[in-house]
Amino acid sequence: MVRRAGLSYHALQLIGFVFACSVIYLFETEQGNLRTDGGIVGILTKEKARASEQKNAASFAMKSDNINVSSPSAIDGVPVPDKQQQQRTKPILLLHLGPTKTGSSTLQVYFKKEQHLLEKDGYHYDRNFRKFIDTKECFFVPNCAVEKVTQEEAWGEFVASLRSGMNVIASNEVFATRFADEPAHWDFLKREFSSFDVKIVLVYRRYFEWMPSYYYENFRMSRNRLKVNGGWDKRMPIFVDWYRDYRERIEPIVQHPAEYDMMKWGRHFPDISIFNMHNNPEDMVADFFCNMIPNATNACSHRVEKGMEGSFHVGKSLNYDILAFRAYEDELLNHVNMTREEVSNAIRHRQEHDLNSSAIEFPLICLSSKEEEDLLGASLSYELKLQPDWYASSRGETEHRAKFSDAVQKRKFCSVNSTAVMLDTGW
């Protein structure tokens, strides 16, 4: 069963603050002053003032019957029925809130691709909600723009789509964690969503798989990163160092990212489902369409027929980038005007083309056997809490352990030993 959280409001608020300030975590936020005139921020400022007068520190205990953690049924092209359809007096607002590195980009591609079928099923997919993906605290900062659109303008476009009278699907993999855990902000959301039955979907991914993928996401090269000093401005820790820091400083606060978001959002929107992305890994999209979107008959049957055509934003190795950055730090590139991407690609070409080797065929630094054991134990523990029925099934713990062993063999918890490579005269 899901672990009960007997945390007070102030404890949860402190957790949210520490989490937001973490340098390591992708969901870090920047501070900004709230505008005191009209608009979103003005409303929030007034509501925050009222909320501060209400010193309600009542503790919250997550009720397991509020959370749907059962594993989805087998896909047969028939969508899951809406069990609350008879009681519903409002359309559904289905918020897919990640967390990050749980297949969100892939789902979003197919939400867009199958929008016409979703509309036949009574669902409008709103893409404006995705504009809050790299905003940090931008949404609550006046005139803060992402993609040349201020966050207040983008929110206005999103809210306009909520007036269509249809069910709405909105997806954003980092909004849930970045959203400020403050009474005024929750009051604002509840008012904006008051004409809907809000259904939140979070995705469960095995913790040991999520960690190296999240590590890659933190330090991979991006278009924005390459604009600053050729991509040389962000240090490249090896996985072992990052892992030890994360588990010591961040995990005691956050635990499994899906569990963190579940506890945070469940206090305000208790209709939460946890989707198990391992149930049907060969066609996660059809599994989601059929089991998480009530009565999506057309979209469900079509995705079952077509199958999943590919995944997007899949994590890779950072070993070439680690070597590139080591060369930069050792001042071996002083007379070469190259970006990090260019140096990394040159190293990749030599390793894979000239030497006919792979990204893991270097001297490596890996987790110790004890650390591997601890990671597996934590991963199993989170699965037992978040997917108890799945864990107890024939595919649960047994498959979990087998996949972990496979990850160890594939050196998923290792990084290149840049010192050893630099001492190799062949390089």
Image (cartoon, helix red, strand yellow):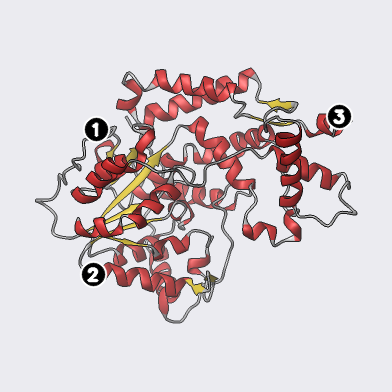
- Counting from the top left corner in percent of width and height, residue 408 is at 58, 23
Q: From the image, tell me which residue sits under label 3.
A: 424
Cα gap from disc 1 to disc 3, whole angstroms: 53 Å
Which residue in the structure is indicated by mark 1?
73
- Residue at 56 percent across and 41 percent down: it is 315
Report the front residue among 94 and 358: 358
Q: How would you rate the neighbour count of disc 3 (Cα within 10 Å): few for under 14, some for 14-19, many for 20 or more?
A: few
Q: Horizontal and vertical percent for residue 291?
A: 25, 41
Percent x, y of residue 98: 42, 47
State the CA–CA distance, disc 3 to disc 2: 64 Å
Q: Nearer the viewer, mark 1 or mark 3?
A: 3
Q: Is residue 119 above or below residue 328?
A: below
Inspect the image, locate mark 1, and give the three-letter code of the amino acid beneath it: Ser
Question: Which SS class for mark 3?
Answer: loop
Quadrant assignment for the C terminus: top right
The residue mark sitting in front, 3 or 2, is 3
Cβ atoms at labels 3 and 2 below 8 Å apart: no
Marking on residue 164: 2
Upstream in sequence: badge 1 or badge 2 = 1
Q: Is residue 259 left or right of residue 334?
A: left
